Amino acid sequence: MQGLKRKIVYVSLFELIAVGLTSSVLVLLMGHDAGHASIAAIASSLVAVVWNFIYNSMFEAWEARQAKRGRSWLRRAAHALGFEGGLVVILVPLFAWWLDISLWEAFVLDLGLVLFFMFYTFLFSLAFDRIFGLPASAQA
């Protein structure tokens, strides 16, 4: 599976599983009811997908204007920090409002989610590539 179909399947499966896991964590660890937790998980998933599109469009526009081409470790780190920083700015107030918790509690919750998603993304991508094969860009 390659191209747009691969990306759509990847994002759809990734977010569907993520919403289920995130909802479960909110219910089990934070004591929120399933409906309330599910809406928070779905909202954060939608925010992440939209933010990903906006942020990557802006980053790539900036990147195209740079004299030095390629993606060094520093540029990749800046990209990741900018993306996650933007998500924190958007999601912390949303979590605080929707879950009726303090901004500090929402921030701690978001940090936990960031750590969780680092591992989840790694494992999901590994499993996805093993099931569906590598994308053309990574094939020899």
Image: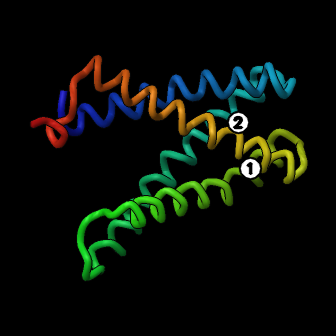
Quadrant assignment for the C terminus: top left
Mark 2 or mark 1: name the one nearer the start of the chain: 2
Dot 1: within a 10 Å radius of its alpha carbon, few (fewer than 14), some, or many (20 or more) residues?
some
Residue located 57% across and 48% down the image: 47
Which label number is shown at residue 139?
none
Residue 6, image quadrant: top left
**Residue furthest left as drawn:** 140
- Identified by mark 2, the residue type is Ala
Secondary structure under badge 2?
A: helix
Whole-percent x, y for residue 93 in the image = 77, 54
Quadrant assignment for the N terminus: top left
Q: Which residue is mark 2?
A: 40
Tell me whether circle 2 and circle 1 mark residues in contact (CB < 8 Å): yes
Tell me: 95 left or right of 132: right
The residue lying toward the viewer, choosing from 92 and 118, is 118
- Identified by mark 1, the residue type is Leu
Q: Which residue is mark 1?
A: 94
Whole-percent x, y for residue 19 in the image = 59, 28
Tell me: 134 left or right of 120: left
